[in-house]
C-alpha cells in the first residue's frame, strides 16, 4: 500500500516538473515583447532596457529557468505583466470560481450520466436504449461555444428565465452579509443562510455548468453502459438471476460496483477536459475565473500569468487523479500490486 502511494506521488511530481518546464520555454518563444506590456504605451528604449533588467529577461534562458524554479519552490509565481499584481494572488482570487463551476458541471454529468448508462444497459437494443444513446451522441457532438450561446439565446433572450452572464447580481451580493468567505459562493451563501444570494448564484451557474456538463455526460453515459453490459455477461450475474433476482435487483445489489472503476477513471480524465473547456465557457458567460484570466493573459503575452495558470491547472488535474488512484485501492485490491 505504501509503495503504491509513493509511486503515484513520484509520478505526480514528475508530471508537474515536465509540464512547467515545457510551458516555461514555450512561453519564452512566443512572439511579442512582454516588456512593452509591463512599461505601458510609447516606452523609450531606456525604459524597455530597465524593464528587461527588472524582469530578468536580460539573463540567459537557462539562468531565467533556474531562477524561476527557485521562486516556484518558495511559492512565488512572479508578477503579472498585465495587472502588476502577484500571479499567486490573481490565481487565488479566481480559482474558487472556476473550481466551483467545474465541480457543479461534473456532479451534474455523473448524476444524470451514470443512472442513464445503467438503464440503457438493462434495456439494450430497445427504444429506451436508442434514445439514451442518442442523448450521449448529442452531448459529444455539440461544440461548447455554440451550445453556450444557444442556451443564452433560449433561456435569457427568449424565455428570460436565467441571467446572461456573470457569477452573481451585484446589488444582491453587496447587500448580503456572508459569514463564511472561502470564495466558493454556493457554499458560503448556503452555510451563511443567505438564501437570496444562494438562489441568485444557482441561477447564474446553471447555464455555464449545463454547457460544460453536456460533453462529459455523453462520456460517462457511454462508459457506464459499456461497463454494465460487460458485467451482465459475467457468470455471477447469471447466478443471481437463477436465484430469482431480477436484472434491476442484481444491478442495485451488486453489479453496479463493477462499473465504478472505469467510470471513476473517466470522471478523473473528464475533470481535465472540463478545466480546458473553461477558457471558452468563461469567456462566453463572463465568468470571473481562471479561464477568463487565461484568455486575457494569452492575448497580452503575460507569460508569468500563463505559466501560473498552467501550473495550477496541472496541479489540480494531477491531484484529482491521485485521489482517484487512491479510490482504486479501496474499490479493487488488485490495484495495490
Image (spheres, grey):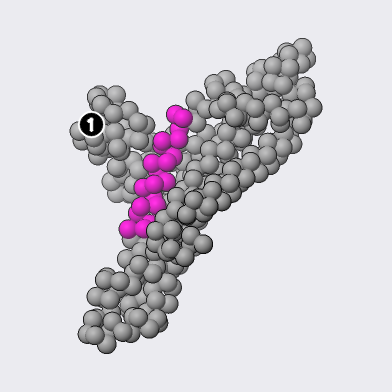
Q: Secondary structure at mark 1?
A: helix
| Residue at the limit of the structure toward the front, as seen here | 2
Q: Return the x and y of residue 108 as percentages of the image width and height.
A: 35, 54
Q: Position of residue 74 (x, y in %)?
A: 57, 26
Is 93 inside the magenta-drawn segment?
yes
| Left or right: 39 in relation to 291 | right
**What residue is pinned by disc 1?**
192
* Dominant secondary structure, magenta: helix
Instruction: In this rendered view, identify the residue nearer to me: 200 or 117.
Output: 117
Q: Is residue 5 visible?
A: yes
* On screen, residue 325 above or below 156: below
Residue at point 63%, 41% (across, down): 17
Q: Position of residue 333 (x, y in %)?
A: 43, 63
The front one of 21 and 175 is 21
Magenta span of residues: 92-111
Whether 72 is among the magenta residues is: no
Position of residue 166 relative to residue 64, above or below, is below
Q: Residue at x 78, y 23 (%)?
A: 59
Residue 300 appears left or right of 255: right
Amino acid at each position: 500500500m505504501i509503495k503504491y502511494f509513493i509511486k503515484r506521488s513520484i509520478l505526480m511530481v514528475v508530471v508537474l516538473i515536465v509540464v512547467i518546464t515545457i510551458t516555461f520555454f514555450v512561453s519564452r518563444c512566443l512572439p511579442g515583447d512582454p516588456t512593452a506590456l509591463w512599461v505601458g504605451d510609447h516606452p523609450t528604449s531606456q525604459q524597455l532596457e530597465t524593464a528587461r533588467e527588472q524582469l530578468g529577461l536580460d539573463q540567459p534562458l537557462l539562468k531565467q529557468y533556474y531562477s524561476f524554479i527557485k521562486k516556484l519552490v518558495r511559492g512565488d509565481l512572479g508578477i503579472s505583466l498585465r495587472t502588476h499584481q502577484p500571479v499567486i494572488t490573481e490565481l487565488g482570487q479566481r480559482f474558487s470560481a472556476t473550481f466551483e463551476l467545474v465541480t457543479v458541471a461534473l456532479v451534474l454529468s455523473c448524476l444524470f450520466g451514470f443512472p442513464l448508462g445503467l438503464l440503457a444497459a438493462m434495456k439494450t437494443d430497445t427504444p429506451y436504449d436508442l434514445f439514451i444513446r442518442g442523448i450521449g451522441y448529442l452531448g459529444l457532438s455539440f461544440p461548447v461555444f455554440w451550445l453556450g450561446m444557444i442556451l443564452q439565446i433560449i433561456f435569457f433572450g427568449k424565455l428570460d428565465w436565467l441571467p446572461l452572464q456573470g457569477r452573481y447580481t451585484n446589488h444582491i451580493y453587496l447587500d448580503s452579509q456572508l459569514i463564511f468567505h472561502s470564495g466558493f459562493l454556493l457554499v458560503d451563501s448556503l452555510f451563511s443562510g443567505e438564501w437570496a444570494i444562494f438562489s441568485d448564484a444557482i441561477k447564474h451557474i446553471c447555464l455555464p455548468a449545463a454547457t460544460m456538463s453536456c460533453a462529459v455526460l455523453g462520456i460517462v453515459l457511454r462508459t457506464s453502459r459499456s461497463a454494465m453490459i460487460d458485467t451482465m455477461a459475467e457468470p455471477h450475474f447469471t447466478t443471481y438471476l437463477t436465484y430469482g433476482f431480477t436484472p434491476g435487483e442484481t444491478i442495485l445489489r451488486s453489479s453496479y460496483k463493477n462499473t465504478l472503476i472505469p467510470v471513476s477513471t473517466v470522471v478523473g480524465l473528464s475533470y481535465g477536459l472540463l478545466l480546458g473547456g473553461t477558457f471558452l465557457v468563461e469567456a462566453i458567460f463572463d465568468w470571473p475565473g481562471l479561464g477568463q484570466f487565461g484568455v486575457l493573459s494569452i492575448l497580452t503575452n503575460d507569460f508569468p500569468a500563463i505559466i501560473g495558470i498552467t501550473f495550477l491547472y496541472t496541479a489540480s488535474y494531477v491531484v484529482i487523479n491521485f485521489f482517484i488512484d487512491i479510490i482504486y485501492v479501496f474499490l479493487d485490491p488488485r490495484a495495490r500490486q
